[in-house]
Image (cartoon, coloured by chain):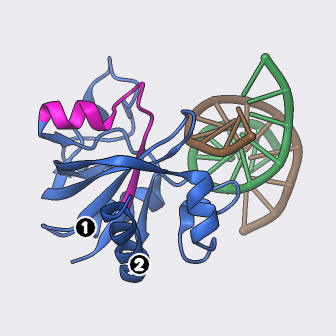
Chain colours: A blue, B green, C brown
Amino acid sequence: MAYWLMKSEPDVYSIEDLEHDRTEIWDGVRNYQARNFLNSMALGDMAFFYHSNIKPPGIVGLMKVVETNVIDPSQFDPASKYYDPKSSKDKPRWHTVKVGYLETFKTAISLEELRKIFSPEELWVVRPGNRLSVMPVGDAVAEKLLYKIQFA
DNA sequence: GCCAACGTTGGC
DNA sequence: GCCAACGTTGGC
């Protein structure tokens, strides 16, 4: 089982929204590196939910992958901001996963805190200028995070 | 609101 | 295939 970190702007979709919806297709990723990570996810993988573009940004909860190889429906929807006219139904460009809500942490772990605990090599989200919205999290890093949350 | 980082696009 | 222009992300 692998761990991931997935970013979302809470104005667009927050952990509270996911708690309400229980499961949701993680749509709108339009970056190939991020998509490749989505493609390599397996059932039961865990993902940290990261709130971006908010004060303070940080990890706010945990979710799990409940369905893999989901074709992102927004790529075919001309009304969607994620519409991709270059994608076709026979050859969809954008696959994603469906995630399920697990928990919202009592205390979020802010980016500032993450920078104190982890090096940029350990955790990509603390890399300066990092813009990737889906990234792997190493087992050791994930365990540290989960341990920290337990005693927060 | 600013701006650095950086991915994508398109002209050549 | 190069690279300048452009657009987006996301922290501050």
Q: Which tag is nearer the camera, tag 2 or tag 1?
A: 2
A136 drawn magenta: no
Q: Which residues are magenta?
A: A5-21
Residue A78 appears in the picture as rendered? yes
Residue A41, numbered label: 1
Which residue lies at the image location 55% right of the left edge and 60% below the top edge?
Answer: A125
What residue is drawn where x is 34% and y is 22%?
A: A80
Chain to which mark 2 belongs:
A
Q: From the viewer's side, name the closer residue of A75 and A89.
A: A75
Viewer-proximal residue, A92 or A118? A118
Q: CA distance from mark 2 to mark 1?
A: 14 Å
- Residue drawn at the location 39% of the way across and 39% of the way down: A86
Q: In which quadrant will I find the C terminus of chain A?
A: bottom left
Magenta-colored stretch includes residue A19: yes
Callouts 2 and 1 on one subunit = yes
In the picture, residue A134 is in which quadrant? bottom left
Q: Is residue A131 visible?
A: no
Q: Which mark is residue A73?
A: none
Mark 2 and mark 1 lie on one chain; the one further toward the N terminus is: 1
Callout 2, which amino acid?
Gly
- Please, which residue is most extreme toward the bottom here? A140
Q: Position of residue A37 (x, y in %)?
A: 36, 65
The structure residue drawn at horizontal position 32% and vertical position 46%, both measured from the top left corner, is A106
Q: Amino acid at mark 1?
A: Met
Residue nearest the observer in this picture, A51 or C4: A51
Residue named by callout 2:
A138
- In the image, taking residue A102 as reference, residue A143 lies left or right, namely right
What is the quadrant of the N terminus of chain A in the image?
bottom left
